[in-house]
Amino acid sequence: MSHIAVLGAGLGGVIMAYEMKDKLRPEDEITVVNLGTTYSFVPSNPWVAVGWRDRKDISVDLSAIFEKRGIRLRPEGAKRVHPDENRIEMNDGSSLTYDYLIIATGPDLAFDEIEGLGPAGCTQSVCHIDHAEQARTAFDALVKKPGPVVVGAVQGASCFGPAYEFAFILETALRRAKIRDQVPMTFVTPEPYIGHLGLDGVGDTKGLLESAMRERHIKWIANARVKSVENGKMHVEEVDEAGAVKTAHELPFAYSMMLPAFRGVPAIIGVEGLVNPRGFVLIDKHQRNPKYPNVFGIGVAVAIPPVGKTPLPVGVPKTGFMIESMVTATAENIGALLRGEQPRAVATWNAVCLADFGDEGIAFVAQPQIPPRNVNWSSSGKWVHAAKIGFEKYFLRKVRQGKADTFYENLVLDVLGIKKLKELRIEPAE
């Protein structure tokens, strides 16, 4: 008998538990460690922040679902991982031992790296449902007393899609409230150009996003380093290609939402050989840690080098389809190890992204996500908004039913003329 532990119950961790359960032998056991029993669909947080969704609409209690699937849930949360001992130290002082560990924690949000950043400071966030609800309160105040808005991401961020999404969703919500004419908007990003996305662009994301911003009268500052934030004012340095300060900006705001940089969670940060200096899990092509071969990593928690050199730190995003590819490869590889075989599955790391604007949106497909690519495509239209709503309903249904099905994914791929996006590369047996 082997015991598999999954650390984290977010977008990757929940589906990881479902797929891994299907690969276990009858005698094997699986436990998910999470802080609390609730799954929340993070991609819908921008809608929560403008009042288009409530917490209950995008949240699922996992207790009964996991029990029905034969998956144990430890809601105390992890204090520290001790890979030399094959042990997780829990927040309540107890321990959980494992034969295989899958780290699917997502990131720690590094608001503290910039003075005044974050919900405890002077800016809003859509990274967590609690943050999104706080952003909703601030949005309601903005509607009552309009003023300038600053939206974007700070240097070191690696998830730019939600920043663009929120800027456009907020713009749509302000138009619907009939106060858009009273709210100047500026988008601030460390990307070297609009639409870089941490991926050096996908298709014509640069042209599409720049055009959408011009059409909606959203100004932007790229190559932007946020120095500090105070109540109602953001201090930003715009740098040149060499990273030298070109222009200093003082941006007034009545409302601001800025995505932070990510780092590894406290439970794993600083564990030598397991994580890089930023706290992200080191993995090989089989999602496996080189020093601790019984530890695997998936999702935002894994270390991926930047796509290329940029004047300011710009990380690589881990999109939903990319994460699910990691999940499937990890389940295949641990399943093989349980049966005395060697890992052979390699995640394709393909990406489909649906960036909602509130009434339309932009979609892009990157095969693989990291260039050079076999497919490098982007498009825009009202269909993207409808597809994003459909994906939300599909994914929450998948979580509630405890299944790792891919019906909606396959439907989207058929519409886009793409097949087998999650197909794995299986290496030949030695």
Image: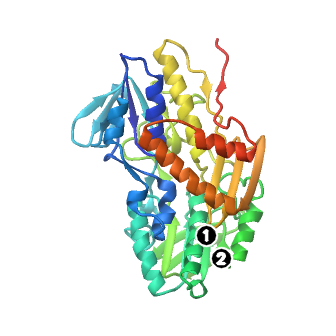
Q: Is residue 158 visible?
A: no
The residue under the point 31% across, 47% down is 36
Left-right relation of 331 to 428? left
User: Is the C-beta separation of discs 2 and 1 under 8 Å?
Assistant: yes
Q: Tell me the quadrant of the picture where the N terminus can be found.
A: top left
The residue under the point 29% across, 42% down is 75
Label 2 – label 1 distance at C-alpha: 9 Å
Nearer to me, 180 or 198: 180
Residue position marked by numbered label 2 in the rendering:
218
Q: Tell me the quadrant of the picture where the C terminus can be found.
A: top right
What percent of the width, then of the height, locates residue 199? 68, 51
Label 2 crowding class (10 Å Cα cut-off): few <14, some 14-19, many 20+? many
Nearer to me, 124 or 212: 212
Q: Secondary structure at mark 2?
A: strand
Left-right relation of 376 to 278? right
> Image quadrant of residue 14?
top left
Q: Which mark is residue 168?
A: 1
What percent of the width, then of the height, locates residue 25? 42, 17
What's under tag 1, amino acid-wise? Phe
Mark toward the viewer: 2 or 1: 1
What's under tag 2, amino acid-wise? Ile
> Image quadrant of residue 421?
top right
The residue under the point 40% across, 41% down is 8
Q: Is residue 20 visible?
A: yes
